[in-house]
Image: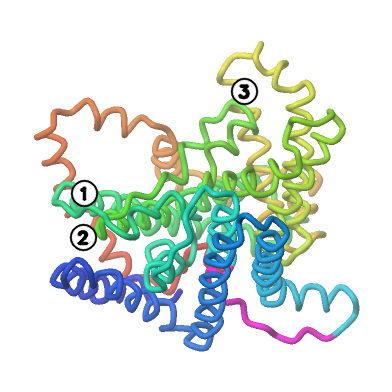
């Protein structure tokens, strides 16, 4: 992580907020840009130069595309140049060693710049939107650089489209209600990460470290369920923190998770999970390929292409490609006939169907070694031949209260109850929850070892 959570929470963020709000409005983007670069460069200052060069390149190309919009060939050439450069940088840093290892060459040991997958996609969306006429080219280099490097969501999303925040970059509203709502949202995200994700992650660490051939059916499912909860509360926690921080600085970002674990199909799951990534691939890859406005075979191929790309985007390892294609095949089957069949089943059965597929998917996602994840999935279905052992029962009973809390927190129940409160009661509850959350999270952070967000590696 660029900063430790404690350093960020108690020193860096308060200082940045203070400087931001004492600065005149017209200079606040400058303060924010400096804060973004310091935040990003704290752990990897060498990659600030890479980011700065790519930002400057797309800034110039954006203006050239707008200027040459009437000359289709020239505008397309500039778009192609931007796409090639951005994807070229992404491939170089993220996939060079993977490609080298698979063709028998020695890896170069290239370090992956934090958040490159996210800010690369943001810059590409800007260029494409300017070309399409969906957004005007940003002529203020500070404003454009602030958009690309915005530290609340820089290193793990959500992926922000320029057209969604263009007006906010140049002029945004700052008020007490938005700031206080930002604090509440931020603390919800921090609690998800520190109190829930980190604790259930320790259970997954136990089973991931085991030889899959010796894991019982109960243990295998317990470990898989642990990672299923860990990645949700870890990543949605970060997204909530980013949205909350954005509000503190006057921005309003779209939600990135919408209770995906209550989905009644995989199609619905991917409308609720990592919404910003799904939206990006839909708008900038799936629809340009023809989407569903083509023949059935071509439509199915489009889905497989998009999901292969989604898998590879997550990391330079075969398991991510398999994970993407796994979902691609299931979504193809749902489009062809499964969705119609599911409509005749009770809601609870449909949720169980979705979660069964999702849990298997997270096992594929979490274990990079192909033989290990296949062996682990085999253990989930009794291939190891090992029955439940006392240690598995012990872990189940020990973590059961936490699992119940997380299962309930994966539904809109708490939000529904909160909204039923009166306005004054909601304010008091939010204040108490923030204070309690801050105390509990601080206690855990002081006592904990380094535990970064899972999506930092993507």
Q: Which mark is residue 350?
A: 3
Q: Nearer the viewer, residue 419 or 205?
A: 419
Report, in whole angstroms, how far the alpha carbon at label 2 lies from the one at label 3: 39 Å
Residue lying at the far right in this picture: please name it: 104
Q: Specify the quadrant of the image occupied by residue 327.
A: top right
Measured from the top left, where is residue 414 in percent x and y? 32, 34
Measured from the top left, where is residue 265 in percent x and y? 63, 28
**Nearer to us: label 1 or label 3:** 1
Q: Specify the quadrant of the image occupied by residue 25.
A: bottom left
Residue lying at the far front in this picture: please name it: 70
Task: Judge the density around disc 2: few (<14), some (14-19), many (≥20) Cα neighbours within 10 Å.
Answer: few
Badge 3 marks a residue whose secondary structure is helix
Magenta segment boundaries in residue numbering:
106-116
Q: Nearer the viewer, residue 107 or 122?
A: 122
Q: Main secondary structure of the magenta part?
A: loop
For the C terminus, which image quadrant?
bottom right
Badge 2 marks a residue whose secondary structure is helix
**Residue drawn 76% across the image and 77% down it:** 96
Measured from the top left, where is residue 176 in percent x and y? 13, 51
Q: Which mark is residue 178?
A: 1
Measured from the top left, where is residue 28 in percent x and y? 24, 69
Residue 330 seen in the current view? yes
């Amino acid at each position: 992580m660029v900063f430790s959570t404690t350093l960020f929470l108690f020193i860096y963020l308060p200082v940045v907020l203070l400087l931001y709000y004492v600065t005149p409005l017209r200079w606040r983007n400058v303060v924010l840009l400096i804060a973004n670069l310091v935040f990003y460069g704290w752990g990897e200052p060498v990659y600030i130069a890479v980011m700065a060069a790519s930002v400057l390149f797309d800034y110039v190309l954006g203006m050239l595309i707008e200027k040459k919009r009437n000359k289709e060939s020239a505008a397309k050439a500039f778009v192609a140049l931007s796409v090639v450069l951005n994807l070229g940088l992404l491939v170089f840093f993220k996939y060079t060693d993977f490609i080298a290892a698979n063709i028998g060459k020695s890896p170069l040991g290239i370090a992956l710049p934090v958040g490159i997958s996210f800010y690369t996609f943001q810059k590409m969306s800007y260029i494409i939107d300017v070309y399409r006429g969906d957004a005007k080219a940003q002529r203020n280099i500070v404003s454009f650089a602030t958009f690309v490097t915005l530290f609340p969501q820089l290193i793990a999303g959500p992926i922000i489209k320029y057209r969604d925040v263009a007006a906010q970059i140049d002029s945004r509203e700052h008020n007490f209600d938005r700031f206080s709502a930002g604090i509440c949202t931020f603390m919800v995200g921090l609690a998800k990460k520190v109190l829930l994700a980190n604790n259930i992650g320790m259970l997954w660490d136990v089973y991931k470290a085991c030889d899959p051939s010796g894991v019982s059916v109960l243990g295998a499912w317990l470990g898989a369920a642990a990672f299923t909860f860990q990645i949700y509360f870890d990543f949605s926690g970060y997204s909530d923190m980013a949205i909350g921080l954005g509000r503190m600085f006057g921005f309003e970002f779209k939600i990135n998770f919408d209770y995906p674990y209550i989905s009644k199909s995989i199609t619905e799951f991917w409308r609720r999970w990592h919404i910003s990534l799904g939206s990006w691939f839909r708008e900038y890859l799936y629809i340009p390929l023809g989407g569903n406005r083509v023949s059935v075979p071509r439509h199915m191929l489009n889905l497989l292409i998009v999901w292969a790309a989604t898998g590879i985007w997550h990391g330079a390892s075969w398991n991510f490609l398999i994970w993407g294609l796994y979902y691609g095949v299931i979504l193809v089957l749902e489009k062809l006939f499964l969705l119609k069949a599911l409509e005749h089943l009770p809601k609870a059965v449909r949720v169980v169907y979705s979660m069964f597929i999702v849990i298997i998917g997270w096992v594929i996602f979490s274990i990079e070694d192909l033989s290990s994840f296949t062996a682990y999935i085999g253990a989930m279905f009794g291939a190891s031949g090992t029955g439940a052992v006392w240690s598995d029962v012990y872990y189940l009973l020990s973590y059961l209260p936490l699992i119940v809390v997380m299962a309930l927190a994966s539904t809109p129940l708490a939000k529904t109850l909160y909204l039923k409160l009166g306005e004054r009661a909601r304010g008091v509850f939010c204040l108490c929850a923030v204070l309690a959350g801050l105390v509990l999270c601080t206690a855990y952070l002081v006592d904990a070892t380094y535990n970064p967000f899972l999506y930092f590696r993507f």
